[in-house]
Amino acid sequence: MSHHETSPNLIAALRELGSATVYEAQGAHGALDSGIKPIHPSMCVAGPAVTVDTRPGDNLMLHYAMLKVRPGDVLVVDAKGFLEAGPWGDVFTELALQKGLAGLVINGAVRDARTIIELGFPVFSRGLSIKGTGKNQPGKINVPICIGDVAIQPGDIVVGDIDGVVVVPQNDVERVVRVSRAREDKERAFREQIRQGASTVELLGLQETLRRLGLE
């Protein structure tokens, strides 16, 4: 499997830049829907995706996937948005820390949130559920999955923080980091000009639009 080719420096850069900047820099695409959020606001993650396609209400494939993950990976699980069971909890979190997993993104729910937060493991989910799951349904790992309208390939870089989660195609990481940095420089200049009294209307050239709408 080729999915550890992205350099740790680029991954660290994406983590630092944050989900919103990265999303805008890659042309406003790749964002998972806003329902998927960190279970604690301080959590952030970046790393190559190990994808899991699993049946709702069953976590056998998570047990299998955890045999295959490598340090720095992000487990990205499509549990079909099912919220009435938590296929991930405190035991998996302990295992994840042992394995050096960078984080979990799940289109579904987790449980034992307090313990996960105390252990400091980054988890992004659609919700929390106290209910457990079965352990007997087949599924697949390291296949393309879809969460909402976002396709995720194994090895794509997943970037998540308080704003949400964005997916960067593996072959586009260098460009996205470059464009993100340029964007940050521009915004830094904007903030400086605002401190000197500029308005956003001036900075963004919105005068003509306002004039056209009779909002002078």
Image (cartoon, grey):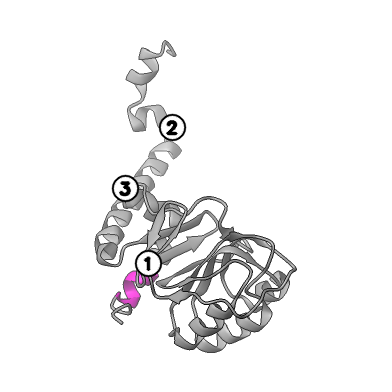
Q: Is residue 125 visible?
A: yes
Quadrant where the C terminus is found in the figure: top left
Mostly what secondary structure, the magenta segment? Answer: helix
Please report the residue visible at 58 percent of the width from the left and 86 percent of the height from the top: 95
Quadrant where the N terminus is found in the figure: bottom left
- Verify whether residue 7 appears in magenta: yes
Mark 3 vs mark 1: in front: 1
Residue where numbered disc 2 is placed: 197
Residue where numbered disc 3 is placed: 27
Q: Secondary structure at mark 2?
A: loop
Q: Secondary structure at mark 3?
A: loop
Please report the residue visible at 32 percent of the width from the left and 27 percent of the height from the top: 205
The amino acid on which the numbered mark 2 sits, given as a three-letter code, is: Gly
Q: Secondary structure at mark 1?
A: loop
Q: What residue occupies the far right of the structure in this picture?
A: 130
Compute the Cα span from label 3 to label 1: 21 Å
Residue 23 placement (x, y as % from top left): 39, 52
First in sequence, mark 2 or 3: give its number.
3
Please report the residue visible at 71 percent of the width from the left and 73 percent of the height from the top: 132
Q: Which mark is residue 210?
A: none
Q: Which contiguous range is marked in magenta? A: 6-12
Q: Is residue 18 visible?
A: no
The amino acid on which the numbered mark 1 sits, given as a three-letter code, is: Pro
Q: Which mark is residue 144?
A: 1
Q: How many marks?
A: 3
Mark 1, other Cα within 10 Å: few <14 / some 14–19 / many ≥20: some
The answer to whether mark 2 and mark 3 are in CB contact below 8 A is no
Q: Is residue 178 above or below residue 214?
A: below
Compute the Cα span from label 2 to label 3: 30 Å
Residue 159 placement (x, y as % from top left): 44, 63
Mark 3, other Cα within 10 Å: few <14 / some 14–19 / many ≥20: few
